[in-house]
Image (cartoon, grey):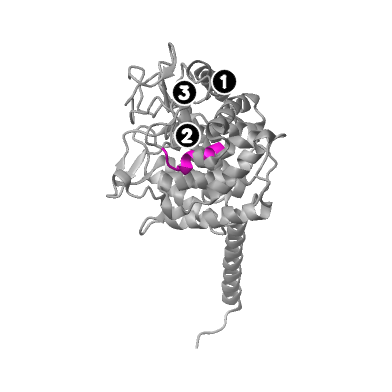
Amino acid sequence: MEKFSFKNYFYQTTIRVLITIFFLFIWKFSIFAQHVLKPFPQHYKYYWGSIKPNNISQNEMDITVVNFYFQWKKRFVKSQKYKHESYIWFEGVGGKQSVSEAQGYGMIITALMAGADSNAKNTFDDLYRYYKSYPDKKCKYLMAWAQFTNGKSDDATSASDGDLDIAYSLILADKQWGSSGSINYLNAAKNMLNAIMKYEINPKTFTGMLCDGIEPESKDYYATRSSDFMPSHFKAFKQVTHDNRWDKVINANYHLFMKMQRIYSEDAGLIPDFIIHLNKKPMPAKSNFLESVYDGSYNYNACRLPWRIAMDYLLNGDQQSKDIVNKINKWVKETTSTNPYNLSAGYTLAGNDIKGRYFEALSFIAPFTVSAMVDKNNQYWLNSLWNYLTNFKIKDYDYYDNTIKMLNLIIISGNYWDIKR
């Protein structure tokens, strides 16, 4: 039998105690890192004069949002086999597994739904790791715009809108969970924002470029996708980076959009999907400029604008935001006779229905609902839109419609909070 040694006993006991303390520290650190600082529901008070649906209680709205969220998550958040990575399912359209736009939407949604979803942080971190696994060829902080079901990636260029949303989601994550855990969200956001300013903002016009593959000699160097204008995002970006160039981006785009309304859509106030000749005489893009014959119309890109722009009024009270969406609100109520069932999926800049688009599209309906929130005179219209929007079943629509609906429901219910407060 081995002889008892007090010295040995003391040494081993000390080691065990130190190991126990170490693991307790790690456990407590992990709990702290996952603590939710702004749990859903937030019932955030938007800018003075803003409204929410008043034909339904706040509790009922919250329940509607949470129920739809878990349906959305089950269908669209997919895990990579054998990896701690997740992506937003693009449903295999065009052979695509996901796109950066989808990843950005999903990361914002997940950060905002923390509290309702006890696993939100793990989901967010998995979405983040997927973004990091598919870098753009030019810059590792930007995401390749498309990933395919065969495991390959189109890493040649980025897509500006996806990068902008991913960057914003990282700021949300920092405010939601802090950046002292395994992922420094704030540092990751700053790296992205420096890259976005360098590669995706035109240094001459301060408008968004279509991707980071655009060079000064490119034919579309002076072109922009209107839905890349996200003024409330940009104000948050300035706060995080202290880069005053974000003010130039905000001012340049507001000026451009007001000009487009005045010259090309005086009655409807609509903005086209793409705008060209920014260095000379800005105008709607011609047919098939980039995506379809409707590139110069209010189509599946620009449909997001009423939401994107209205957010700057809801969060910051920017009067330019309200002026732009008020023109759209006035027209859309008139053209539909304040009946959501009369909405179409696409319009000319004159405000006429695009031929053959007489069907319901949540990607058009939901942003009109958000824009209605800027003025109390839209209360009946807003209530009607809420009823209409929430009636549609998730099974009847695709990733794009359902994801825009999901994000907009969070806003409409008053649960989209400002990182600046």
Query: Is residue 179 at all visible to an observer of this figure?
Result: no
Mark 3–mark 1 Cα distance, whole angstroms, equals 25 Å
* Amino acid type indicated by mark 2: Cys
Q: Which mark sits nearer the N-terminus, 3 or 1?
A: 1
Q: Is residue 245 above or below residue 398?
A: above
Is there a contact, CB below 8 Å, between mark 2 and mark 3? Answer: no
Q: Position of residue 203 (x, y in %)?
A: 46, 19
Amino acid marked by disc 1:
Asn
Question: Label 1 to label 2, Cα distance in Å?
Answer: 21 Å
Q: Residues within 10 Å of mark 2 (few under 14, many from 20)?
A: many
Q: Which residue is mark 2?
A: 303
Residue 350 disc label: 3
| Helix, strand or loop for disc 2 | helix
Q: Which residue is mark 1?
A: 251
The local secondary structure at tag 3 comes to: loop
Which residue: 40% across, 21% down? Answer: 223
Horizontal side of 171 relative to 264 (left or right) equals: right
x 58%, y 35%: residue: 371
Q: Earlier in the sequence, mark 1 or mark 2?
A: 1
The first of marks 2 and 3 along the sequence is 2
Q: Which residues are magenta?
A: 358-368
Which sits in the foreground, 126 or 19?
Answer: 126
Q: Position of residue 25 (x, y in %)?
A: 61, 61
Chief SS of the magenta region? helix
Q: Is residue 256 above or below residue 368?
A: above
Residue 86 in the magenta stretch? The answer is no
Name which residue lies at 62% across and 44% down. 383
**Camera-nearest residue between 135 and 220:** 220
**In the drawing, does residue 167 fall left or right of residue 14?**
left
